[in-house]
């Protein structure tokens, strides 16, 4: 079988692998990225279907992610922003909760929405101020517990937990039980409260495409699936051997475990994202809509075309409906049940919504139960010559994937002499 060699082999061309590659380029270190799929991006990809841009599951870029700010060219991504706040459906109605400084016109609605008590609102301000003072490092040094325990002990009322925190963080961490680490919750709450959620005009897939620019085409090999790791390199599923002194595993957590020959833990959180098109959007401003009813399949809804009109070439609106995983339901029954729920929310016009496609994502995020450690302090070194980046033994998300790629590259640069 054909052999080829390089200094560093990076397995996976998701954003963590690409971030690692970008840092190695600066040092002139020879590397080869091996990607099993046919495109770069891993879990961040966009398709073009019937004139719409469909992201692989609804996700957003937070404009305050520090690593994204330093690594990505936000202007070139042409970021389009969601409204600062959310719309919550509760008691059969939609209520808008906005940032009163950035959307003063919503102040009255925000104060009177039946989402929580006045004390809850004051506690939110206290939590926000406390997180700001602590900063990311302080948050990751704070006592770690399940988010639900943190919220109850703060203490927030059951009403605001059920109507706001639960659907919001179910959407962010795909964890409706709020079992995720309170450190993760506090970090994300801080990020959401201090910046904007955004979509690139050409779809989320534009992020890894931008990251891959500047990496020579012959240093990213697509359709190259690594079967196993050996002492002096890797073997692909087609039998080809590629030698390299250093290996970086930048794959999804369970795949990293397989490649390291560790027991594979199935702690994946999945979702289904149903895309519909409609002549008119169900709301008029680009708010994320949460299900605060405490029942139903729908967790959250977004209308990407209200944020980024370029998501549609026809002027019709695109609606993304997120359902947390229900493995027992086939796509057809799911669409039927979601549509009847949508009719209760938005009435008869839903009959004319056209279903475009449903994405079923088994591994969107890993479980983020406590304890979690500070991802900024992480090394990535597994043993001599083998490193990981991405979510393995870390927390997931765009910020941490980008950071872990850079930190792993820097450790390789410090520990090895390639010249
Ligand atoms: C639906 C959804 C919503 C999300 N929402 C958000 C959000 O709003 N905000 C946020 O910050 N984050 C969000 N995330 C998380 C974020 O997208 C991920 O944390 C991040 O993209 C992970 O990047 P990665 O490079 O670590 O892994 P991946 O993107 O999974 O990349 C791993 C790559 O490795 C390749 N690979 C795997 N095995 C092999 C092998 N054996 N050989 C070669 N290649 C291999 C895969 O094909 C893949 O391309 C979301 C994720 C999903 C799926």
Image (spheres, helix red, strand yellow):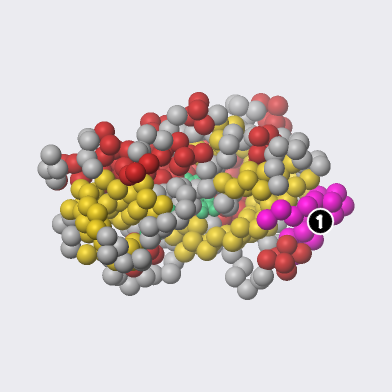
Q: Is residue 288 above or below residue 132?
A: below
Residue drawn at the location 66% of the way across and 34% of the way down? 310
Taking 29 as reference, is 92 left or right? right
Which quadrant is the C terminus positioned in? top left
- Does residue 204 lie above or below 150 as drawn? above
Res 185 seen here: no
Measured along the vertical axis of the image, is residue 128 above or below residue 231?
Answer: above
Residue 101, x across and y down, in percent: 60, 26
Q: What element does badge 1 sit on?
A: helix
Q: Is residue 82 above or below residue 117?
A: above
Locate residue 263: give its quadrant.
bottom left
Disc 1 designates what residue?
344
- For image coordinates 57% across by 40% down, the residue present is 203
Q: Which residues are magenta?
A: 337-357
For the stretch drawn in magenta, the main secondary structure is helix
Which residue is painted at 52% across and 31% down in the image? 77
| 307 falls in the magenta region | no
Q: Indicate the quadrant where residue 344 lies.
A: bottom right
């Amino acid at each position: 079988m054909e052999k080829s060699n390089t200094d560093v082999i990076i397995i996976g061309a998701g954003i963590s692998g690409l971030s690692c590659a970008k840092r190695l380029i600066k040092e002139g270190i020879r590397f080869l990225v091996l990607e099993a799929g046919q495109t770069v991006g891993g879990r961040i990809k966009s398709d073009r279907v019937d004139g719409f841009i469909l992201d692989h599951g609804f996700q957003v870029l937070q404009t305050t992610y520090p690593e994204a700010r330093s690594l990505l060219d936000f202007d070139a991504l042409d970021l389009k922003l969601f409204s600062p706040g959310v719309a919550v459906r509760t008691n059969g109605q939609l209520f808008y909760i906005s940032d009163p400084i950035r959307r003063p016109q919503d102040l009255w609605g925000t104060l009177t929405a039946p989402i929580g008590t006045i004390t809850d609102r004051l506690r939110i301000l206290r939590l926000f101020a406390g997180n700001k003072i602590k900063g990311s490092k302080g948050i990751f040094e704070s006592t770690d517990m399940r988010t639900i325990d943190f919220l109850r002990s703060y203490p927030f009322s059951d009403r605001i937990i059920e109507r706001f925190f639960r659907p919001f963080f179910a959407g962010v961490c795909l964890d409706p039980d709020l079992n995720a680490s309170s450190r993760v919750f506090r970090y994300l709450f801080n990020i959401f409260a201090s910046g904007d959620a955004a979509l690139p005009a050409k779809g989320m897939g534009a992020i890894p495409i931008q990251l891959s620019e500047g990496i020579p085409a012959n240093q990213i090999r697509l359709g190259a699936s690594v079967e196993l790791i050996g002492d002096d390199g890797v073997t692909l599923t087609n039998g080809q051997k590629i030698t390299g002194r250093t290996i970086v595993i930048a794959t999804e957590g369970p795949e990293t475990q397989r490649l390291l020959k560790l027991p594979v833990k199935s702690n994946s959180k999945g979702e289904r994202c149903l895309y519909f098109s409609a002549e008119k959007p169900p709301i008029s401003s680009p708010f994320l809509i949460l299900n605060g009813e405490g029942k139903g399949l729908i967790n959250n809804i977004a209308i990407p075309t209200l944020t980024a009109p370029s998501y549609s070439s026809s002027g019709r609106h695109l609606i993304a409906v997120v359902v947390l995983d229900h493995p027992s339901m086939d796509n057809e029954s799911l669409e039927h049940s979601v549509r009847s729920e949508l009719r209760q929310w938005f009435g008869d016009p839903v009959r004319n919504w056209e279903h475009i496609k449903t994405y079923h994502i088994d591994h969107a995020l890993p479980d983020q139960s406590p304890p979690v450690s500070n991802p900024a302090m992480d090394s990535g070194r597994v043993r001599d010559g083998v490193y990981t980046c991405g979510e393995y033994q870390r927390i997931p998300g765009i910020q941490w994937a980008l950071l872990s790629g850079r930190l792993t590259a820097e450790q390789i640069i410090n520990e090895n002499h390639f010249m």
